[in-house]
Image (spheres, rainbow, N blue to C red):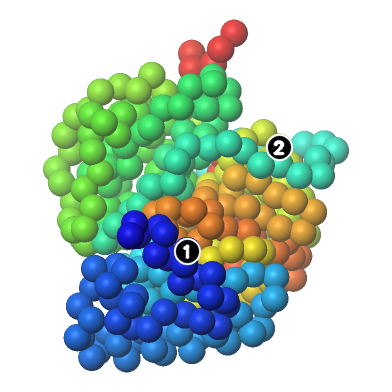
Amino acid sequence: MAKIAVTASLLSLGQAAQPTFEEWAAEYGMNGDDDSMKTNYEANVCIIDELNDRDASATYAVNKFSAMTHDEFAKVYLNLKQRPSSDLPALEDVSAAVALDDSVDWDVTPVKDQGQCGSCWTFGVMGAIEGMNKIQTGNSVILSEQQLVDCDDDGINDGCNGGLTDYAYKYLTGKDLWTLASYPYVSGQSGHKNSCGSGSASGVSLSGYFTVPGSGSGSQGDSALAKALMTGPVTITVAADNQFANYHSGIMTGVPTECNLNHAILATGYGPNFWKIKNSWGAQWGDAGFAKFERSTSGCGPFGIFFQDAGFQPKLASHNLLV
């Protein structure tokens, strides 16, 4: 039976009926005799059951990370860097007063998988550029995250060891962005950084980026992010926790609003009561790689998204646009 079919059949048993460790191990090709993994898995199932009991608006389920402790998971996947004290100036902001649409849902490029590499910052940026290019030109061009992993060596961004999204935008501005086909992604090598090679120009380039203001204010950030999303997808950052990591479907509610960040993702839309995002953990995570979580103006916003800036949005060079 196909992997997707097995997963669907297991989940159809109900929110509380997670597969046994042995079933999960067979599903994901793991060692079903590993006692340490089994202990971690059973602890995560307890967390998932508690989440399903607490949050009726979403479902939570086991996934490929379920035999890892949260610390093990965070070491690989949640290593967004902290902003240095001397920060880059924003090129432009998107704070003009506009009437908000009730909902937005952009058709962006397919979900990717960062693998065993702390490169979420590259996927949040390249996903936004791909999405904006698709909106503005009608063309679906798939770009190379490995270009940022290998070549963005500015003393802040450091390949699989983490980075910052605004510094990535600064690096890419004015450069030819390479296609994924010509410069493939190297997954499964945590901490690995190739020397910078060369790829084929995609025809997509940036003249800069827009800053979506947040400054820790939930009310300001909520409005600013919605305004920006009316134009196209936005690179955002979150403080991903167990609730986020174990998400499967629906709208996450009761999420934390503390002011900290550890993961870069892509905001692709919103509704009256939720934000929609595209993640970089593959299409098996969440709702085919996407997720929804509640809109909130408490604290620094849901999962801390309005802490510091609310996000960044690519500004494509004019020669990319259809006229």
Residue 78: tell me if it is visible. no
User: Around disc 1, counting alpha carbons within 10 Å, would you say few (fewer than 14), some (14 to 19), or many (20 or more)?
Assistant: few
Residue 123, which numbered label? none
Q: Of residues 306 and 200, which is closer to you in this image?
A: 200
The image quadrant that residue 84 belongs to is bottom left
Q: Secondary structure at mark 1?
A: helix
Residue shown at 35%/68% (left/top)? 64
The residue beneath circle 1 is: 8
Q: Can you give x and y, in whole percent of width and height, for residue 282 in the image? A: 39, 54
Residue 66 x, y percent position in the rendering: 38, 76
Question: Visible in this render: residue 154?
Answer: yes
* Three-letter code for the amino acid on which mark 2 is drawn: Met
Question: Image height check: is 149 above or below 30?
Answer: above
**Which residue occupies 48% across, 89% down?**
46
- Gap between marks 2 and 1 measured at Cα: 34 Å
Q: Quadrant of residue 229?
A: top right
- Of 39 and 198, nearer the camera is 39
Residue extending farthest to the right is 99
110 with respect to 68 (left or right): right
Is residue 203 or residue 217 the one in the foreground?
A: 203
In front here: 27 or 170? Answer: 27
Say which label, 2 or 1, has the lower sequence index: 1
Against 230, residue 122 (above or below) is: below
Residue designated by label 2: 230
Report crowding for label 2: few under 14, some 14 to 19, many 20 or more residues within 10 A (C-alpha): many
- Element type where label 2 sits in the image: loop
Image coordinates of residue 143 in percent, x first then y, are 36, 33
Vertical comparison of 260 with 157: above or below: below
Mark 2 or 1: the one toward you? 1
Q: Amino acid at mark 1?
A: Ala
Residue located at (30% from left, 34% from top)? 180
